[in-house]
Amino acid sequence: MDTEVRKGSSPRHVLSYDGSFVELRCGVDKPKWRKKGEEYLNPRLSQIDNYLIMKDVTIQDSGIYQCFGWNEFNDPYQEAIEVIITGNLLATVVIMALIGVISMKVRFILHITILIEYTSQYFQV
């Protein structure tokens, strides 16, 4: 009997900027994480339960991350998350606007504050 690998939703995208941190969440507990299909060892990475936490990210951390594990029915599971790291916060905000995801959940109030301040400097708001 063939076992079908259950997949998470279509690849998600996480957008962040150089020097920040990124949290990736997998749909199963205690998964194995890979970048571009290979084990990605980095002292700035840590795993807590189903989260991969990346500290002080750089542009080199950009790529497709995959998590592998087993769901509550003991079926194989995999999910892909694309991480995009830009050079700075402003570039991140511009890219978010260009790709139409400016409504994404913003993790820090600081991001919103900077966006509002930047917008009000250049546009009469």
Image: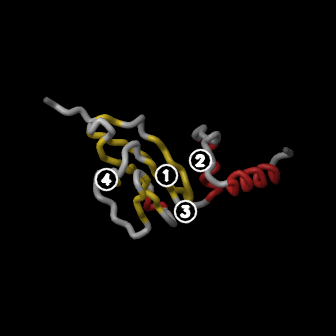
Q: How crowded is mark 2: few (under 14 residues within 10 Å), some or many (20 or more)?
A: some
What amino acid is labelled 4 in the image?
Lys
Which mark is nearer the camera, 4 or 2? 4
- Which of these two is toward me, 78 or 58? 78
**What residue sits 55% from the left and 62% below the top?**
18
Q: Which mark is residue 53?
A: none
**At which x and y percent is residue 106?**
63, 48
Q: Which mark is residue 32?
A: 4
The residue labelled by disc 3 is 18
Which mark is nearer the camera, 3 or 4? 4
**Left or right of 97, for residue 123:** right
What amino acid is labelled 1 in the image?
Ile
Q: How crowded is mark 1: few (under 14 residues within 10 Å), some or many (20 or more)?
A: some
Which mark is nearer the camera, 1 or 2? 1
What amino acid is labelled 2 in the image?
Ile
Q: Earlier in the sequence, mark 1 or mark 2?
A: 1
**Left or right of 73, for residue 15:** right
Is there a contact, CB below 8 Å, between mark 1 and mark 2?
yes
The residue labelled by disc 1 is 84
Q: Which of marks 3 and 4 is nearer the N terminus?
A: 3
